[in-house]
Amino acid sequence: MTSQTPLTILIVDDSAEDRTVYRALLKSEEAATYVFTEAATGENGLHLCKTVAPDCLLLDFHLPDMTGIEFLDALAKTAPVPFPVVMLTGRGSEQIAVQVMQRGVQDYLVKHDLTASALRRAIRNALDKFQLHQMLEAHRRLLHEQNLELRQREASLQTLNATLEQQVAMRTALLELLQMVTAAANEAPSPEDALQHAIERICAYTGWPVGHVYLPASDGVEVWVPTTIWHLEPPARFAAFQQDTQTVHCTPGEGIIGRVIASGRPEWSVEVSTDLTVRRLASARTAGLTAGFAFPILAGRDVVGVLEFYADRQQAPEATLLDAIMQIGTQLGRVVERQRAAEQLRQQQEALYQREKLAALGSLLANVAHELNNPLGVILMHADLLREESNSSSELVLVEEIVQAAERCKRLVRNFLTLARQHKPERTTVVLNTLITETIELLAYLLRVDDITIHLALAEDLPLFRADPYQLQQVVTNLLTNAHHALRESSAPRQLTLTTRCNPARTSIMFEVADNGSGIPPEIQARIFEPFFTTKPLGVGTGLGLPLCRGIVEGHGGTLRVASQPSQGTTFYVELPIEDVPETLSVPPELSSSPP
């Protein structure tokens, strides 16, 4: 208590003399100031409790209209007693003391033993106890609220954990599905086996009873045809649907299959009744199929097949499942792409055999080329004269067509001479970075099929130099092809790096072809530049590629060397001298559209 703040004391006692005594006892304390409010009945005291809001209540146990216990019960009917209470009684009773204490009374005094110090001490103790009780109740409420919040968070955490466990289990199962399909696709003896395994695993995971594969027609027409790759569970139930499907061919944009072909995007839970063609709609309904799912098989950005599935229930889109099946489609696309590459290689080998058969015609081709050179030169000369003398735009168009046709014939003559091995080395201005990037573009497809990543580290300030672009392209092609063959036998990641640079004196220009394959053993490195030496199987390599590359590089006054360590890859280094380039630069000739 402080002297600055007076305490409002509400005295509820039917004895005026007792009220006077209480006031006198409290006023005898100089350090405290009191403001007194009095009531002689319980009803008046209850009214004052609501209007005055005292700091402390001095309550007589025996009132004319009610007892002190009844007073406290009435006061606490809607809420706890909002202020400290000191109970006063004419005679002490342990039972009464217990009852009033249970109702929140802070102290209990007997009137005939009352002294000023006892009353003041009782009021101070009541104020302190009440304040501590209020603080305790506030802490209890706060603790209760915190406990409720904690339980709510625990419940939310349990729900979240259950959801996360479900998601982890689903993602784990999807990852296992993806790994199994990928491994089977890479180990399958044929693309058909890989596709069959894929649809069976997908149907087993999703519970879809029907799975099938559409592939493009082999004749190159824009028609997609059904295959014999099916999953039916049970087979008898869907036999009619399978039979009807075998007669349905699709074009881009037609039905669920055609839309996937045209867009390269999946179709999810399509209504069978509104999407399937008439020829297989009836059998689908009979089998109870209601929802269709279709996913593209992608080779790069090209759709090379479509996986179609059917179920007897609609299913909300699942992002993780959709992503997993799209990745499976990409893996299967690589299988199809490898088959294409193998077929392309077979065709190239066949073409090589045909070229060898045509080698005997080289002399004839050379004679024809020489005979054509002279009239082509006359045609081009007269075309230039016509271009200069013509004033008509229509005539100029005709002249340009003549020039283009003659230039095409001239390129054909050059190809004849190359085939007849009578193409003389040409020295012209070469942009090395351009030559390398154009050569990579010719081989990019085959490298991509075998999952080989190409890294380019091309210097931007390379000087121009004079060389034969056709021969240099042949060198780059041979080195890239050798690296490709080496990486094909290696495990992922397969990386091939091409680097260009110039020496500080800018007297020579260099490029490197490096792979991270298995490397070349030292005993073989010593012989790789020997003519006809090869480690490839009979009929696959001639042993002339690297000797030819070294001959071309040395013919340009340069050097070709190799550095390799087992299990650390191989790097070929080509260094060429830089000759003075004339101020009037000639346009580099257009490189061949196919590798030499």
Image (cartoon, rainbow, N blue to C red):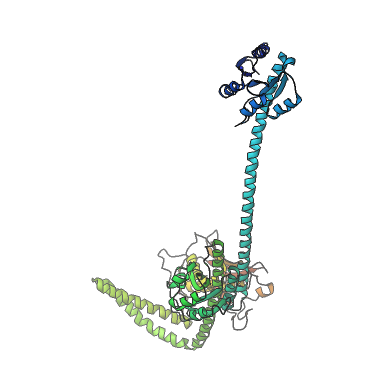
User: Horizontally, is 183 left or right of 373 in the view?
Assistant: right
Q: Quadrant of residue 10?
A: top right
Q: Residue at x 64, y 68 (%)?
A: 569
Q: Residue at x 61, y 62 (%)?
A: 170
Answer whether residue 72 is visible to the viewer in this image. Answer: yes
Q: Quadrant of residue 76?
A: top right
Q: Nearer the viewer, residue 197 or 36?
A: 36
Pinpoint residue 261: horizontal percent, then vertical percent. Answer: 46, 71
Image quarter hosting the N terminus: top right
Q: Nearer the viewer, residue 221 or 155?
A: 155
Q: Is residue 222 above or below residue 145?
A: below
Q: Is residue 531 above or below residue 52?
A: below
Answer whether residue 4 is visible to the viewer in this image. Answer: no
Pinpoint residue 350: horizontal percent, then vertical percent. Answer: 52, 84
Q: Quadrant of residue 106?
A: top right
| Number of numbered callouts drawn | 0
Pinpoint residue 385: horizontal percent, then vertical percent. Answer: 28, 74
Q: Is residue 142 above or below residue 595?
A: above
User: Horizontally, is 564 left or right of 247 in the view?
Assistant: right
Q: Nearer the viewer, residue 480 or 179?
A: 179
User: Horizontally, is 195 left or right of 587 in the view?
Assistant: right
Return the residue found at the far right.
Answer: 94
Return the residue found at the far front.
Answer: 65
Pinpoint residue 264: horizontal percent, then vertical percent. Answer: 47, 68
Q: Nearer the viewer, residue 497 or 580?
A: 497
Return the residue found at the far left.
Answer: 391
Q: Residue at x 44, y 86 (%)?
A: 365
